[in-house]
Image (cartoon, rainbow, N blue to C red):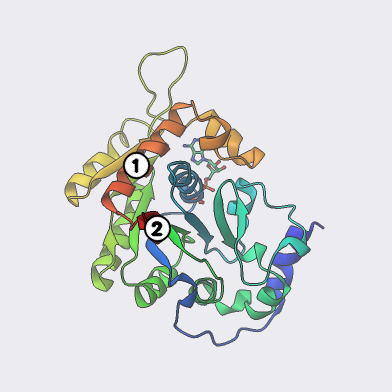
Amino acid sequence: MSKFMDRTTSLRRHQPQQIPLTARGIDAVQQVIAVTGKGGVGKSTLAVNLATALAQAGHKVGLLDADLTGVSIPLMLGLEQLEEQTIKRGLPVSSCGISVMSASLLDQAGQEFVSAEAGTGQLLYWLLDRIHWGELDYLLIDLPAGSDEPLLSLARLHPVTNLLPVTTPQKISLANVRHSLDLCRQVNLKVLGLVENMSYFMCEHRTNPIEIFGIFSAGGGQKFSEEYHLPLLATIPIEMAIGQAAETGIPVTIAAPESPAAAIFRQLADSLAASLPVRPEIKSEIP
Ligand code: ADP
């Protein structure tokens, strides 16, 4: 069994502990963006590529994987073979120009403190409170699917969190976004707009895009964003380069910067940075 699996397994063995409702670890973080959506729609893919695209544009970026098992993000960033001794107590790991933390990257002390039985909301508190994120322009949080708990925890902790829902064009995925938006209204979380992933597929033998989920789903994100008066921030195609990048542990923004998908992630990063401005660093203001 790999070290990666060992960490996840040992995480499950420990008893839950009471975790305080504070987020001292993100005191110096300017903007928090939480990516949410149904399982499998591409939350981790979006979070990883948006984080690296923001970093490529010169921002200081962190990426927090709020899933209890913490498997996808480390794999997508080539971190699954990380040795225990390279994980420093309370500090995120550096990869692809961003600071990363995930349950599976916690040091032994972290694993002993956080247990799977503690629940996703408590894990989130712990990762925002005990991990020293330092000065960041943007912290992206990849929220786990299937529970309202992390979103409600976030609203309690950091009321200025910006939510970025991701969906496929399908009704089944949009229904999940509808639920999150209703919840956001109740807890006053700001929603930035909608990202539609797996919107279409460009086949090299055809000029028109293929609606991968069939004609009934086509334009699903567009119609939904009009209904909710939300901007449709990006439509991301199904692209082989995105899937390959996830397998090799190098995000498509870095592995294939010239690909159409990488260009879309960069555009999205630029438009989010424009709508969520950050203060320049103090040192750059000194003449
Ligand atoms: P989630 O975090 O929502 O569960 P993931 O980001 O893990 O979803 O994506 C699920 C799978 O789909 C992964 O294997 C990922 O590589 C693949 N994937 C996601 N978006 C795309 C895309 N636009 N093109 C190709 N593959 C994609």
Residue 169 visible? The answer is: no
- At 33% from the left and 60% from the top, the residue drawn is 162
Type of the residue with mark 2? Glu
Q: Secondary structure at mark 2?
A: loop
Image quarter in which the N terminus is found: bottom right
In this view, the residue farthest toward the top is 205
Give me the C-alpha separation between circle 1 and circle 2. 18 Å
In this view, the residue farthest toward the right is 1
Residue 57 versus residue 44 in the image, above or below: above
Residue 59 rendering spot, x and y as whole percentages: 43, 50
Q: Earlier in the sequence, mark 1 or mark 2?
A: 1
Residue 209 versus residue 90 in the image, above or below: above
In this view, the residue farthest toward the bottom is 18
- At 37% from the left and 28% from the top, the residue drawn is 211
- At 47% from the left and 49% from the top, the residue drawn is 51
Q: Which residue is mark 1?
A: 270
Count neighbours of disc 1 (C-alpha within 10 A) and say few if under 14, some if 14 to 19, many if 20 or more: some
Q: Secondary structure at mark 1?
A: helix
Residue 155 located left or right of residue 84: left
Residue 260 rendering spot, x and y as whole percentages: 44, 27
Residue 260 visible? The answer is: yes
User: Which numbered dot is residue 281?
Assistant: 2
Residue 93 versus residue 183 in the image, above or below: above
Residue 163 rendering spot, x and y as whole percentages: 34, 59
